[in-house]
Amino acid sequence: MKPDENLKVALYQNLVKARELEEQMTKLAGFHAGVGEEAVVVGAFFGLKDGEYCAPHYRGALTAAHMRGADLHRLIASVMGKATSYTRGRVRGDICLPFQFRTLGMFSGVLGNPMNIATGMALASKQRGDGTAVVTSFGEGTSNIGGFHEALNLAACLSLPIVYVCQNNGYAMSTRSDYSIKTGSVADRAVGYGIPGIEVDGNDVIAVFEAVQTALERARAGQGPTLIDARTYRLSGHYTGDNNHYQPSEEREAWIARDPVARLRADLAASGIMDEARMDEIRSAAHAEVAAAIAAAQADPEADLSALGPDDLYCPDDAERASA
Amino acid sequence: MKPDENLKVALYQNLVKARELEEQMTKLAGFHAGVGEEAVVVGAFFGLKDGEYCAPHYRGALTAAHMRGADLHRLIASVMGKATSYTRGRVRGDICLPFQFRTLGMFSGVLGNPMNIATGMALASKQRGDGTAVVTSFGEGTSNIGGFHEALNLAACLSLPIVYVCQNNGYAMSTRSDYSIKTGSVADRAVGYGIPGIEVDGNDVIAVFEAVQTALERARAGQGPTLIDARTYRLSGHYTGDNNHYQPSEEREAWIARDPVARLRADLAASGIMDEARMDEIRSAAHAEVAAAIAAAQADPEADLSALGPDDLYCPDDAERASA
Amino acid sequence: MTQMTFQEAVVAAIVEEMDRDPTVFNMGQDIGPIYMGAMHSAKGLSEKYGADRIIDTPISETAMTGAGIGAAICGMRPIVQIMFAEFLGMTITPLACEASAMWYKSDGQISVPLVIRVLCGAGPHRGHAEDYIGIVSSVPGIKVVMPSCPADAKGLMTAAIRDNNPVIFFEHMGIYHGPRQEVPGEAVAIPLGKADVKREGADVTIVATGMMVQRAQRAADKLAAEGTSVEIIDPRTIVPLDIETVLASVRKTRRLVVVTESWRTGDPLSDMVSRVAEELGAEGPLPIARVALQDTARPFALPLTRASMPDLKDIIDAVHKVTKVQK
Amino acid sequence: MTQMTFQEAVVAAIVEEMDRDPTVFNMGQDIGPIYMGAMHSAKGLSEKYGADRIIDTPISETAMTGAGIGAAICGMRPIVQIMFAEFLGMTITPLACEASAMWYKSDGQISVPLVIRVLCGAGPHRGHAEDYIGIVSSVPGIKVVMPSCPADAKGLMTAAIRDNNPVIFFEHMGIYHGPRQEVPGEAVAIPLGKADVKREGADVTIVATGMMVQRAQRAADKLAAEGTSVEIIDPRTIVPLDIETVLASVRKTRRLVVVTESWRTGDPLSDMVSRVAEELGAEGPLPIARVALQDTARPFALPLTRASMPDLKDIIDAVHKVTKVQK
Ligand SMILES: Cc1ncc(C[n+]2csc(CCOP(=O)(O)OP(=O)(O)O)c2C)c(N)n1
Ligand SMILES: Cc1ncc(C[n+]2csc(CCOP(=O)(O)OP(=O)(O)O)c2C)c(N)n1
Ligand SMILES: [Mg+2]
Ligand SMILES: [Mg+2]
């Protein structure tokens, strides 16, 4: 699907809001921002149909959930564990998302689980036979976990409707991807599963979007999974407290020169879709929206002890089902 | 290393003994024989140096341990859990081997563990810096487990001296390899780790031997791991009770025609290294040796309750170390 | 009523639920028409429902479990067969870290109606006996079921499939193809979390699980001949445990013997013993004895295997030990 | 004697052992010179020993553990850092199914001198608090250590590295960068399997682990003011447990309170409580109370996190409950 003008405008709107979110949130203690990686997140999760499920990588998760309909203020309140959090403060909202928007997060801090669970979400699609597909994303460091291998192989064997997007930002904490992945390419791993492995410029939101849409079409048509290796770069630290001093400055400069937001802006301006003034306006609006959401969340009350449990450890029986 | 005549004779001796072992042992209840796969086992574990460690696949494990110096009678007694077992009956000797011969088995029934442990054995080689290398083998079904992925990637990143040999016999229990591995090739998976992935005719013992030796030389020279995909076929059932009715008869016939023992015999005869009579003699001797070992093991006493424990759950302290 | 083995009873429950609920499906290694599951644990299912609902998988227990969770949270009711309980370690990260927590942490947005079937226990196979029940019982939010007879197996499987939480269902190989026994002909769920008093008695309470329930029965017969009246409780659901039924019994007998085929180390029934001691120990003498698997890895040779497990004599000795104490 | 934080004490013990034994090496994610381990758990090691003995790995906890086992059985003494205890599920298959059984099942041919380091507990990180101690404590053959102060951390790490068995070493984040305390300046191993009586008392025994030892001390101070004399025992090694020291104390006090930051479900100290009840319960009234983590997944928001954990009041209430019972 070639993006038309409206779509490009929408991508820009999402991309700048994502940038604002990452930049403003990274000022909060302990946040794992993904400044520089927004094009992968927006490109991967923009085009899903309402009935479809997804499971985004923890870095960029808020953007993905917001694109699927979650409220920015409540998402941020969830990061802070406020009473207005989507779970009344029960789960950390930075990595765990409100599932009512068909968007899965991590219920623990263990990387790799979401890929396996997303694979089962795709299995449910297949069992229902309703032509829906699933998109999940993960870091390149996560692709070294055994669960990655098992998930992709299972999806390949059962021809499941799922798109695996690697948000390949060059680092896993301080570990360079060329240390933990000898070829440097996550796409190469698709060879072993007999599925397409596609490298894409992760700082080009349109390229990511197109690659994911093509893979989604394959998936929805029953042709099985695709692995997309979206190359990008983490300009922020691993988390707020990390000053990423380990990134060589020439490397950083090179990636800053390829900034995904600047790139889309240049494209939009050059093709006459929007002028600089209009784009600035959108950016200012996004800035204000995020700032307001953070301020509102900060003003919210702390989580209330009524949310504690433990009387609801288990999901109760479904009355008809149990007695049928 | 090109095998010379002596080496070919030795390979033949080992190959026919392996065949005898598999054929005779498969008459015992619950044994997981590997009739038809002997060339992979012999080719993989024949050329190791004394100081080197290995971790063979459970199918064919007795042959590997015997080639490394373990006594046939005691190995078989260990399968039966007799008092003369290498562990006084504590562990099942069909899949778990006496480590005094630097040959690791499975201490549980969980596939995949030995690959990870063997990777650590290679890490020990690297830490010692003594130029030794490790060979481990595993089934193609096992290559679908996450541990395979993690082990190979870790070995690749740390450039460990290890050779991974896939004893690719076409089936995992009743599951065909073309069902569980879409490309049918385990060698393809090496691409994702940036290490050599080599396909070899697993019914050609000389080809397997040469491929493993080449990989061992690379490993010993510090050039890292190799994955060898040795294509063979399981002519026996998954275990004694399995009549492998699920194997199409044309498929079986084709593989029977490529029998590894017959093949080496033909080669040896054609090249004039041994005549049929000599080869028959070797085969008869092997037959008798295995039969005698089984009979001796059968006559051994059952395991004695003195072996029960549990007072030795833990390995005691090393006196000097603890007090140093 | 009809007659079934343990294995037949489990499969019958699955068939009933699959017939009435199209969202139930099975996933596992070698459960298809050729192999029908290890020990015929899925016998007949593939013929009846085909490869769409009886799905063969590669050897990848972590992915199978994760996929089961994913399908469950999207409206399906998967039954994942992990061939042997020995492999539960590979399921524990998705189960413990994600599935167990989803309902609570999502504040009721996500339920995980998932059943994990596993074979366990000393049986005809000369391996795979470990149940690792301690591993899966040590994280809140997972239900753990271990039936001791065909009727319970059927009713508990029905309940497990209908339950909206992750349930691990242990099928003991030592009683799997045992004698056929009466089971209800139609679907009757036995509520999870309800213990069963298998035998009423006055002098001592034996709590036993799995294959040990039969052994406890045999011991009770012998003890009855001596004049000791034994009450036997089978928790059936190990987590959550029906502590009330146990407390009621021990309040009456004030003597407790626990018989499991688990290691003491990590046996989930330790917590039960602890609760009994907390609730009732302050009131006066409360003799307690436990009979468990030897605290080492399970030895292989048959004489060693047998000696490492609780036998009739061990159970009777334990009862003697607690009855020695006068009330 | 010298002054160290918990974190410094652990690293100091590792340095001492690495200096005297060339077979000791470390492997983990981000333990190299750049990151020096999560929470600086490997601070200074890489500068001192370089990349050959402080090995950075890809994210692959199963392989790291398996590789640790493999290196250990071939003559090395690896220390594998699994960043957080929350990831222990990924280590359990190689640890429980292989490493734990090797010495016993090989009949003494194979020892596995392996240390697994993990961070755990509620602390400055807003996550990764789960210790999953029940998972690793439910299989015989693995030793489990949880120090409660810098001196114990140092001596126990020394012993863990010298031990010939797999040892899981829990490092509590809530006390990791706490105040410096006295620790021996040279290597002195604290034997694994020996509990420490942290405070002597006559009226009630508190058994507490990890960060809960401090809380128990604070509770004991308050209770002393009320005239209740509390004995505090820190098992230090959770498996194998020094039951003798606990029994000796409870024989004296005949009242037991257990305080852990684990869930009751699967808390390895359940087995300890059970043993105490088995040994001493028949002799007369034996009041027991437990204070544990709330039996749900750990909630996130700070007020909820706090409320879900044992606090001073919970401990004092539990002591009141058991002291209410007259001897
Ligand atoms: C199983 C597991 N191991 C280790 C960690 C600790 N950890 C948190 S984030 C991270 C790096 C992840 O790298 P990558 O997958 O590339 O994602 P990124 O952070 O770069 O977005 C690590 C190692 C974890 N959370 N889970
Ligand atoms: C983790 C795990 N899953 C499942 C099994 C049950 N199982 C035993 S052998 C086997 C097939 C193994 O296939 P493969 O690796 O190809 O080896 P082969 O038996 O063909 O030699 C299976 C699934 C197991 N032992 N371990
Ligand atoms: Mg990354
Ligand atoms: Mg195979």
Image (cartoon, coloured by chain):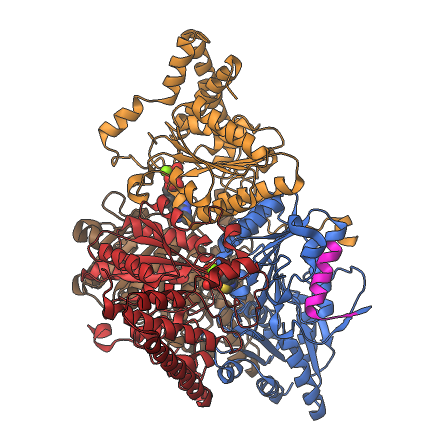
Chain colours: A orange, B red, C blue, D brown
Image check: A184 left or right of D88?
A: left
What residue is at 69 percent from the left and 74 percent from the top?
C249
Q: Which residues are magenta?
A: C3-17
User: Is residue D108 found inside the magenta-colored segment of the image?
Assistant: no
Foreground residue, B314 or B279? Answer: B279
Residue D64 or residue D123, whichever sits in front:
D64
Prevailing secondary structure class for the magenta stretch in the rendered image: helix
Relative vertical location of residue B291 with respect to residue C166 in this rendering, above or below: below
Question: Toward which corner of the image does residue B71 lie, by quadrant?
Answer: bottom left
**In the rendered structure, does residue C14 fall within the stretch colored magenta?**
yes
Find the residue positioned furthest to the bottom: C226
Question: Of B6 and A195, which appears nearest the observer?
Answer: B6
* Left or right of B43 on screen, residue B139: right
Instruction: Assign ligand 1 to one image quadrant.
Output: top left
Instruction: Identify the image quadrant of residue D149.
Output: bottom left
Q: Could you say where residue B185 lies in the image, as x and y percent from the top left?
A: 43, 49
Relative image position of residue C221 (x, y in whole percent): 70, 86
For residue B313, side relative to residue B6 (left or right): right
Residue name at image x 27 percent, y 51 percent? B158
Residue D117 visible? The answer is no
